[in-house]
Amino acid sequence: MQGTRFKLFPQPGFLDAFAEPEVIEVSSPAGSLRPGPSDDRMYTIFPIGKAQPYGISPDGSDALAPPWTGEVEAPAMPDAEGHFDYLEPGTPQFETAHLFGTVRFVMDIWEDYFDRTIPWQGEKSYDRQELTILHSLDNAYSGYGFIEMGADLSTGKPRPFALNFDVIAHEVGHAIIYSEIGVPDPRNVTGEYFGFHESAADLVALISSLHFNSLVDLLLNNTRGNLYMLNAVNRIAELSDNKQIRIAANDKRLSEFAEGWVKEHHLAQPLTGAFFDILVDIFHEMLLDYDAISPEMEDLSDQLLATHAYAPVMQEMFDEAYADHPETFKLALLDARDILGTYLADTWQLLSRQDLNFVDVAEAFLHVDQAHTGGRFERIIRGNFHLRDIGLVEVGPQLAPLGKDSHANSVRTMLPID
């Protein structure tokens, strides 16, 4: 059965490499989606006259929650065959279709990894999730019953987050974790839980973005398959405009937070970095399986990692191997992507405690590898968590109150009171 087509930007359209959106197909059968777009699980609106985002009002006197009952822009309409890929950028209708299409695309990906439907957190109170746009909001949130997209207001001209795949996918990631593990009480939760939450949302966005052929091709063409090249901070802008890849390819260690932490986004980076390195190492294992690189090349990569000799020696070897097997490199990367996505989905289903720490996440991930492969990747997994000091040091206390930019103590954690 044919799905429904949308045009999505794999990365923001103001980036030269992604000026044109890519046509993708979501799981919704062609003709099943209604104006909005909308379906039985979510609906998209572009409110007119909405003065404030969902959440507590600035003066603390009131709370605004969905559904929005005011005026809205005309909805995006499906074409005669039920598709939305005829819409062109520059209209409210394209923006709402892009938002809906991205959320459905990301949910398709992760429901495949979970091997089941992922419920919305607010299903007890709302029949459907509201996807809404508010350009005056200099942020984006997923909350109880809604996902609200603001805009980047830093450049003088709003750049809508509803057209930014990474931002939308990140918010869907938060929604998945809140649905699967629950919303914590900010007064009784560990800092590492908040760090885990941000890491999980970044990983949802990263893995989802690797389902775009154009982005995978660009990533491999730029690195020639040497993904550790992304850790060279001064070259990252040349290699990829993907925000989540830049965050994931970091060298942060948990020991940097032994004295304490302030921002959960920073605390997340050692965990995200460990998972990125695991992705790269599984990619190498897949390349070995396909005989696209030699065992000697893989061993040399491990020996030279984090040394000054790595880049000049290994890049030449990757250039030659990729030139000989470009399609095999792509297949190996997609295999590694899907292994990590499946492992993460299974891991998150084993976590339930609000006082979890990164060691809990690592142990659950090792358990999943044992269940799937009998522990094939145990050495890789343990080595990369150890490299990030996970299990070797304890995170210190929270050193300052959560700021206004914190997502841990925000409209995301606002729940209805009976």
Image: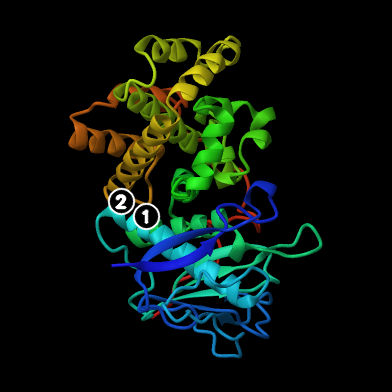
Q: Please tell me how crowded label 1 is: few (under 14), some (14-19), or many (20+) other residues with Cα within 10 Å.
A: many
Mark 2 lies on a secondary structure that is helix
Q: Is residue 249 left or right of residue 57?
A: left
Q: Which mark is residue 346?
A: none
Type of amino acid under label 2: Tyr
Q: Give the x, y percent position of residue 406.
A: 60, 55
On the rendered image, what quadrant is the C terminus found in? Answer: bottom left
Q: Please indicate whether residue 23 sits to the left or right of residue 371 in the image.
A: right
Query: Residue 16, percent across and down?
Result: 69, 48
The percent position of residue 337, horizontal first and vertical second, equals 38, 40
* Element class at badge 1: helix
Disc 2 vs disc 1: Cβ atoms closer than 8 Å? yes
Which residue occupies 66% across, 75% down?
A: 91
Q: Is residue 413 in view from this perspective?
A: no
Q: CA distance from mark 2 to mark 1?
A: 7 Å
Image spot of residue 268 (x, y percent): 51, 41
The picture quadrant where one finds residue 87 is bottom right
Residue highlighted by disc 1: 109
Residue 91 lies, with reference to residue 289, above or below; the image says: below
Q: Is residue 110 above or below residue 394?
A: below
| Residue projecting furthest to the bottom | 70
Q: Residue at x 65, y 54 (%)?
A: 403
Which amino acid does the dot numbered 1 rest on? Answer: Ile
Of the numbered discs in the image, which one, if any, rests on residue 113? 2
Disc 2 packing (10 Å; few <14; some 14–19; many ≥20): some
From this view, report whether residue 106 is shown above or below residue 43.
above
Q: Residue at x 62, y 26 (%)?
A: 232
